[in-house]
């Protein structure tokens, strides 16, 4: 059973506000990921991390930033939210192996609406 | 840009029908192919990780096959049930565990 949590599940916020989406996992996984999904579109990787103090940009450019100070915690921050940031954001984690076969475990997602 | 394509985009079947859908991916530099099921209001859940050409994996009424030479994988559901209704995603690893996802096939099973 995967234990990966995201808060909030839903967020409606005004333009210009700073927001942080929380993601935590209790599996001790080294690798963590943030994906963004617009309605009807694919999941796109926006950030990933191989471990503490490691963060990388994903395949889709994003104005958000992430940090990885603790293994279990990988928050995503938007300094100034805009309507174009309206989307669903999913966090995932996986064990570190030198293959591409490791399963990613997903959180339930945060649906963000910026007015 | 890596192309992972899934078809059909959506599918409606009756309870008891068997169904299948396709994931197409680049046949060069193949590492693995992942299948996920994503039910509404839940987290995406891993179904299979397929690695070898000709691989066939099964989980209950769901099975998947893999052809790495031609770059496709089929997902089959035998005797569909309403609880099988979900979006089925395939994903292709690019490097170091990063996944590129297809758009998904939305399956609706009508009672």
Image (cartoon, coloured by chain):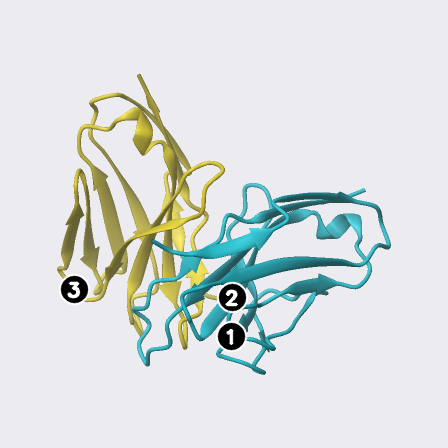
Determine the colour of chain B.
Answer: yellow
Compared with residue B63, is residue B77 higher up or lower down, i.e. above or below?
above
Side of A81 where B99 appears, left or right:
left
- The residue depicted at 33 percent of the width and 72 percent of the height is A100
Location of residue B18 by image quarter: top left
**Badge nearest the viewer, 2 or 1:** 1
Q: Name the residue that disc number 1 marks.
A: A71
Q: Name the residue that disc number 3 marks.
A: B53
- Tell me the cyan chain: A
Q: Check disc 2 and report its element: helix, strand or loop.
A: strand
Q: Residues within 10 Å of mark 2 (few under 14, many from 20)?
A: many
Tell me the distance, in whole angstroms, between the alpha carbons under discs 3 and 1: 35 Å
Q: Which mark is residue A33?
A: 2
Residue that lies at the very extreme toward the right in this rendered image: A16
Compared with residue A69, is residue B107 higher up or lower down, i.e. above or below?
above
Side of B27 where A35 appears, left or right:
right
Indicate the chain on which mark 2 is placed.
A
Compared with residue A72, is residue A10 higher up or lower down, i.e. above or below?
above
Instruction: Name the spot of residue A6 as percent of width and height, x first.
Output: 56, 53
- Nearer to us in this view, B88 or A72: A72
Location of residue A79 by image quarter: bottom right
Instruction: Name the spot of residue A85 as percent of width and height, x first.
Output: 72, 52
Q: Check disc 1 and report its element: helix, strand or loop.
A: loop
């Amino acid at each position: 059973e995967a234990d990966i949590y995201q808060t909030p599940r839903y967020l409606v916020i005004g333009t210009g506000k700073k927001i942080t989406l929380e993601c935590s996992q209790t599996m001790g996984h080294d690798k963590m990921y943030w994906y963004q999904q617009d309605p009807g579109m694919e999941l796109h990787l926006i950030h990933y991390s191989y471990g503490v103090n490691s963060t990388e940009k994903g395949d889709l450019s994003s104005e958000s930033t992430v940090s990885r100070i603790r293994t279990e915690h990988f928050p995503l921050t938007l300094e100034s939210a805009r309507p174009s940031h309206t989307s669903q954001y999913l966090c995932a984690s996986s064990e570190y192996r030198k293959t591409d076969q490791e399963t990613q475990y997903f959180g339930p997602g945060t649906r963000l609406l910026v007015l | 840009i890596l192309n992972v394509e899934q078809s059909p985009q959506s599918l409606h079947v009756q309870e008891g029908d068997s169904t299948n859908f396709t994931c197409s991916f680049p046949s060069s530099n193949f590492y693995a192919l992942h299948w996920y099921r994503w039910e509404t209001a839940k987290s995406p859940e891993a179904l299979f990780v397929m690695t070898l050409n000709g691989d066939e994996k099964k989980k209950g009424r769901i099975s998947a096959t893999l052809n790495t030479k031609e770059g496709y994988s089929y997902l089959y559901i035998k005797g569909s049930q309403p609880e099988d209704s979900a979006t089925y995603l395939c994903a292709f690893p690019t490097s170091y565990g990063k996944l590129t996802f297809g758009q998904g096939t939305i399956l609706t099973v009508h009672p």
